[in-house]
Image (cartoon, rainbow, N blue to C red):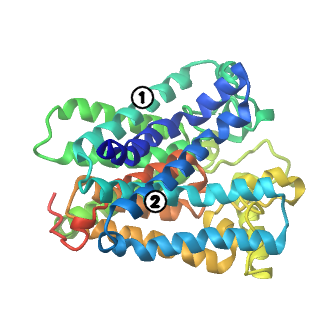
Amino acid sequence: MVETIKQLPRWGVYILLAYMPFHIFLSQWLGTSVGGLSAWKIAKDVFTIGLFVCTAGLVLLKVPRKEWRPYTTLIILAGAYATLHLVLYLTNRETSLSVAALASTYNNRFLWIFLVGIGAGLLLRTQPDKKVLIKFVLAVSTLLCVLGLLQWFLPDDVLTHFGYDKALGVKPNFFINEDPAYPRVFATFRDPNSFGAYLIIPILLFVKLVQKKQTKNKLLLGGILALHLVVLYLSFSRAAWIGLVIGLGALLIISQKERTWEVVKRFWPIFIMVLLVISFVVYTIRDTSTFRSIVLKADDKNAPTELDSDEYHLHFMKEGARKVIDQPIGHGPGTAGIVSIHNGAEGQLTENYYVQVAHEVGIIGLVVFIVMWLLVIRMLLNQESSLLSTVLVASAAAYAVMGMVMHLWTNEAVAFGWWGLAGLTISFGNSHNKTPRNE
């Protein structure tokens, strides 16, 4: 019985990894069909909190202190980060309790799932089967890509039949500059940018699998990888496109640094020629409607006084940064980011996750968040070399940049995907037993 209970945290993480990409779709569909939409929306967070409390209790009761002591720093920082949210709400009161509670949950839940993953390893004294875990992640992402591709061909209003409604907080379709000629796929996610961000980890996994000599069925894997790349393109998420390039570069540096450097030294003239050709092509088509819409997101139908997509992003970032400078201690949870739209005119979108955190919990809170993230990355680097840990570190480089142009960790599927996998991957037994990364 005790051994069965110890399995609960790991199974809980698996359940959340599978459920989160479909959460929006299922909660909207069930909530509008059978009622209780709000309950369906918060059920995942209630489950996560319960799983976290259960795991923490089991670790304290069943795991010797010396085994979980290496993670004490991270636990203390996570506790301090959560406490900072509470203190700044109580001292500022710039939003309602319900909005502050929702924002605090969004800002902390990925840390909870990470600690659950760590706790699962401590309780079972083993890591999950990495091959099974990778197949699990890739099966979920492939299903999402199939749905995304279908979405490209189906009518624009198909998701309205499943409860998607802008009035309910979830748009049923997305277009570049609201032009129906340029639809964007987002599968079962809240928006195309979050969907694109989610696809980075599975794409990097597929790249590594296709690259490995021992891999069987490379043709099949290559086909599925192509599907992922096509769907990523159809999301028209420039942040995800750039993030993937950064992730691929980081993957090469981490896993094959010496070989990559040798190739660069040998073929650098060719790389320069390719870059020049691309630059020439871009310069040639820079004024075409397709390029301006897809790449620049420029809306030529706008009046001269209206802002385009990039200008709106920059405007929100500047406004958020200005308020951080005005009050560096923080305005309290729920005053910035996606949750802040519930505050009406007082809400502050920042289009930048770092500015959002600094706006809500101050410069100190931002430093605590970054330190925790860096500690987790260091733990991944200190693990025995594995495909999953390598991809997580590479994707962290991509996400670090993407967080500058979107509310990255607010999306549950992206946040739980990276932090949940990191928690399952990190093992106490291997944390100081690093081996060369020669995959």
x 33%, y 37%: residue: 136
Q: Which residue is mark 1?
A: 143
Quadrant of image for the N terminus: top left
Q: Earlier in the sequence, mark 1 or mark 2?
A: 2
Q: Is residue 239 left or right of residue 432?
A: right
Q: CA distance from mark 1 to mark 2?
A: 33 Å
Res. 269 visible in picture: no
Q: Which residue is mark 2?
A: 56
- x and y percentages locating residue 316 in the rendered image: 75, 62
x 35%, y 69%: residue: 68
- x and y percentages locating residue 395 in the rendered image: 40, 57
Q: Is residue 348 left or right of residue 363?
A: right
Res. 250 visible in picture: yes
Amino acid type indicated by mark 2: Ala
In this rendering, the label closer to the viewer, 1 or 2: 2
Q: Is residue 33 left or right of residue 434?
A: right
Amino acid type indicated by mark 1: Leu
Classify 10 Å Cα crowding around label 2: few (below 14), some (14-19), many (20 and above).
some
